Image (cartoon, rainbow, N blue to C red):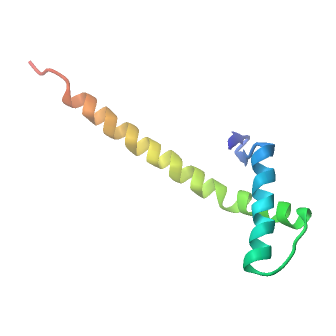
Amino acid sequence: MSLVRNKLTLPQEQRTQIVEAIKEYHLNQREEEIGDLSAILLLDFFTEKLAPAYYNLGINDAKAMLLQKLEDLHGLEIWQ
């Protein structure tokens, strides 16, 4: 996933795999067959609405980890 102009995008191969997974889900769980366009539109909706929240969670986790490492470095200082 990449961030371009505050818009998250997936590589084409991943998009194709997810579209197939959405179609399979609908068929297996809802007993509905949907086409490529419906699956793509659903993926685009979820990417627009959910991906930023998950992306920000990842960023916040990374910040917390980096802050912890920075605190660890402060513990290594030699005080005189």
Extreme-left residue of the structure: 80
Name the residue located 65 percent from the left edge and 56 percent from the top edge: 51
Left or right side of 66 for 28: right
User: Where residue 10 appears, x then y in whole percent?
Assistant: 74, 46
Q: Splitting the image into 4 quarters, where does residue 73 fall?
A: top left
Name the residue located 63 percent from the left edge and 54 percent from the top edge: 52
Name the residue located 75 percent from the left edge and 57 percent from the top edge: 18
Extreme-bottom residue of the structure: 31
Q: Is residue 59 above or below residue 20?
A: above
Name the residue located 69 percent from the left edge and 41 percent from the top edge: 3
User: Where residue 69 appears, x then y in whole percent?
Assistant: 33, 35
Q: Is residue 21 above or below residue 72?
A: below
Q: Splitting the image into 4 quarters, where does residue 31 fall?
A: bottom right
Between 31 and 37, the residue placed more toward the observer is 31
Q: Is residue 69 above or below residue 24?
A: above
Considering the image in quadrants, where does the N terminus appear? top right
